[in-house]
Amino acid sequence: MITVKNLSKRYARTVAVDHISFEIQKGQVVGFLGPNGAGKTTTMRILTCFLPPSDGSANVAGFDVLEQPMEVKKRIGYLPETPPLYPEMEVEEYLTFVGKLKGMSGPSLATRVGEVCERCAVADVRKKLISKLSKGYRQRVGLAQAIIHNPEVLILDEPTAGLDPKQIIETRDLIHSLAGSHTIILSTHILPEVEHICEQVIIISKGKVVATDSVQNLQNRARGAESVVLEVEGRDGALDSKTIQQRLEMVSGVSRVLFKESRANRSFFEVESLKDRFIRGDLARAVVEAGWNLNELRPSAMSLEEIFLQLTGTEKTEPAEAPPAVEEVAAPVAQEESK
Amino acid sequence: MRNILIICKKELRSYFVSPIAYLLLTMFAVIFGFFFWNSVGYFNMMGLESQMRGQSFPMSVNEYVIRPLLSNASVIGLFFIPMITMRLFAEEKRSGTIELLATSPIRDIEVIIGKWLAALTLYVVMLAFTAVNFAFLFRYGNPDWRPLAIGYLGLLLQAGGLLAVGTFISTLTKNQIIAGAATFGVCLMLWVMEWVAGYETAAWARVLAYLSVVSHFESFAKGVLDSKDALYYVSLIFLGLFLTSRSMESLRWRS
């Protein structure tokens, strides 16, 4: 459905997309994952014929984006990062306008507008001015706009950005319901989103594709080794982190001991095992036998988050670089509710 | 054609749901009405004078009222055009809706012509209000309607050209104010450029005077349809729309 070969986009001073290639089958939901500024939006803009590529080729629904942009445009629905809304229009009027732009007309358009309003849960505001709508409604009107002409390919740039947790779940459900009949690419920097909606992930960093795989495979890839978080407390006030670290490293099956920090007379470590070794029991014994208190010992399954950081080569994100608070709060809630 | 109308209708609607259109219409009607009142007052005074002298000289409503009024209307138009065109593309760029237009199966040129037509339509509505004033002339006087019609045609052509230039300038920025101010500057320059012809006869001065929009309006105000002047305005329209389409395309390569 979508074939991208050696696609590049260069600006005056920067390379936004650097020879990326991937292929997406019909009916798949693919997550486009990467930190801000990785080239997600640029790639999507090329696929929607908004930007021409500097190099390489992109084929969407059987048509080349440079050779036959009109044919491509007829077959895609696009939700840019900021929904392209006209604040002075009413919702229904806006959707009708977009439908006409996409070549629809007459009673079939009117019925479709009704359908889409129901589907995107904006039916209750169809007579309202877009300027009066809340962020969540705007996002959904944006989504309604993208699917109005029932396109084969849906390209969604951060469809859940800026929504509250409840809205995020609703939007995900909506995208879920669209899967199968549409081929969907969605970009995000929120990982749980990918775990929940997508079958396939394309991880992109600094304009390059660093991994393309199914969500399942990526998780399995990381599950082989065990990772354990340890909190050790010295008994008589004296505690030497170095000594503890050395002791932990001696435990059989341990591949790496990472000293995190030390507070008062407590030290925090992260310990990784060799492949297929279980080390928690041995670790606990080692700590206790050495005469220290074992305050905490818990496995930390390697999340997609860590795989992502490994692959994109970023260190653990500092708070300043972390995504906006809403999303951080939203993600775990969403995870719980969907279980 | 269908796409042009879709865009044109959408654009007209946004003029008329915001106060912009009403503000422009009112201001234009008031200012034009004031000019009309003055011309008629002046004309009456001249009529009285000629009677007092006892020797009447030919008094033509066309010559003394309509012609100066049309010239004035063309100048007032210069001031209104930036306000009509400034938002056309600047607003779409600012709000990101340009992405919707650019990724829909509709050609750039259809978007451009649609927007330009909407701007021109608003200008026509503005001009339509001036007809009220002229209706009085026809009720109480006996002017010739043909020069008036040609004058209106001239106003329309001139506005078409300047609106096309304004549309082009609107594609250059995300900021409506910048687009408006730049358009105003360009319109004003296109107007005053002909002044050099007053004291300079060198080739460059004649070129400048030729390029000035106002010098081509003279014949229309007189009621003479001069193909040379009409051609000037038509070329200005094409130039403006052509530049707009180039600018739209370059947006994609730059942004």
Image: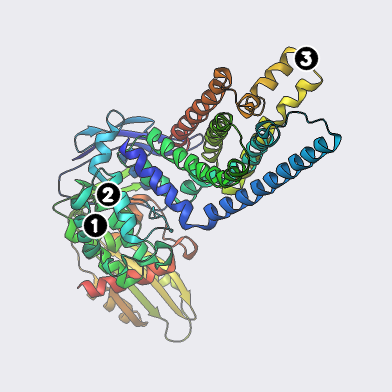
Above or below, B147 against A29 in this view is above
Label 1: which residue? A113
Above or below, B72 against A182 in this view is above
Name the spot of residue B252 as percent of width and height, x first: 43, 36
Q: Nearer the viewer, residue B16 or A283?
A: B16
Q: Amino acid at mark 1?
A: Val
Instruction: Check the image and name the residue furthest to the top.
Output: B203
Q: What is the distance, in whole Å, between disc 2 and disc 3 at their CAs?
A: 58 Å
Name the spot of residue B96 as percent of width and height, x first: 43, 49
Q: Image point 33% across, 61% down: which residue?
A: A91
**Within the image, what quadrant is residue A283 found in?**
bottom left
Q: Image point 68% across, 17% down: which residue?
A: B207
Q: Amino acid at mark 3?
A: Thr
Per the image, label 3 sits on a secondary structure element best described as loop
Q: What is the distance, in whole Å, between disc 3 and disc 1 at their CAs?
A: 64 Å
Q: Nearer the viewer, residue A154 or A322?
A: A154
**Within the image, what quadrant is residue B190 found in?**
top right
Q: Are marks 2 and 1 in contact (CB under 8 Å)?
A: yes
Label 2: which residue? A99
Instruction: Check the image and name the residue furthest to the front.
Output: B54
In the drawing, does residue B173 fall left or right of residue A57? right
Q: Bin the neighbour count of mark 1 within 10 Å (Cα to Cα): few under 14, some 14-19, many 20 and up.
A: many
Q: Amino acid at mark 2?
A: Gly
